[in-house]
Amino acid sequence: MSNNEAEIQKNESSVNLQNQINTSKKGLWTLSNIIDEQSKLISSISIFIALTVFSINFPTKQFSSLLSSCFFGVAILVLIELYVNLPPWRQCEQRLIFFKLIIMQSTLFFIGYYLLAFRAGVSYFLPILIVNLFIWISEKFAIAIDSQILRNSLRAPTKIDENGNEILVFPGFVQTSLTLGLLTFVIWISMQLVPAINFWLDKIPKS
């Protein structure tokens, strides 16, 4: 092992040790820990938000809509990824709690700003956006449900084989039933919300 590699490992060990010390002082995560660990995500968020704002003011309207939609989608995904990687509230110091609140509010303001800037174009794709949003929420809700509860509530059809063992006739019955049920509910509630949101967007005065 060369001297440079040994020095790099030593520096990494010292940084990890310092992070452990900072975290273990009160048993809570600090803002500095998160900035060190998630520096790449934070930098990516700044870049994609800046690109979104820049592309909104692009001279060519069609090209502006296409670019801003791409950058906006990536920025929201990175914001969600950053928020998911943050520790739970009870494990955060006060400054980190404020940071999490800022991330949440910034995401909402960013979405609102984009909707106001492109509400004419967004209204056509609003059903797709809302359906995808509810599918994502439903997926998280389904993961949170205990699998045993699903098995008891959605009893899969079974049969007895030649050895007297009970086997599933349709192995993916529970997952398929849950998916179809959630998808039907998601599409129905999305269609109920789309007219109201379009009406609200139309009432906002143009700048």
Image (tube, grey):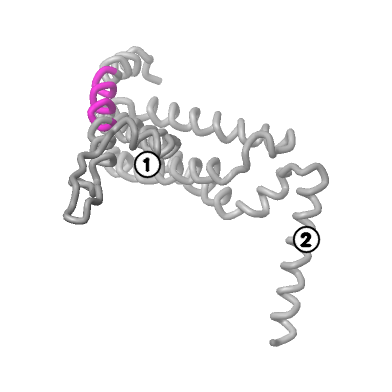
Q: Residue at x 31, y 29 (%)?
A: 130
- Of callouts 1 and 2, which one flags the residue occurring earlier in the amino acid sequence? 2
Task: Report the amino acid beneath label 1.
Answer: Ser
SS class of the residue under badge 2? helix
Q: Residue at x 37, y 15 (%)?
A: 204
The x and y percentages for residue 96 are: 69, 38
Q: Tell me whether the residue at label 1 lies in contact with that at label 2, contact meaning CB atoms closer than 8 angstroms.
A: no
- Is residue 145 visible to the viewer in this orientation of the structure? yes
Was residue 52 drawn as part of the magenta stretch in this picture? no
Q: Which mark is residue 145?
A: none
Q: Which residue is mark 1?
A: 68
Q: Is residue 117 left or right of residue 184?
A: right
The x and y percentages for residue 89 are: 65, 34
Task: Please rate how many residues cluster around mark 1, counting C-alpha atoms within 10 Å: few if below 14, some from 14 to 19, many from 20.
Answer: many
Region rendered in magenta: 182-192
Q: CA distance from mark 1 to mark 2?
A: 42 Å
Q: Which residue is mark 2?
A: 17
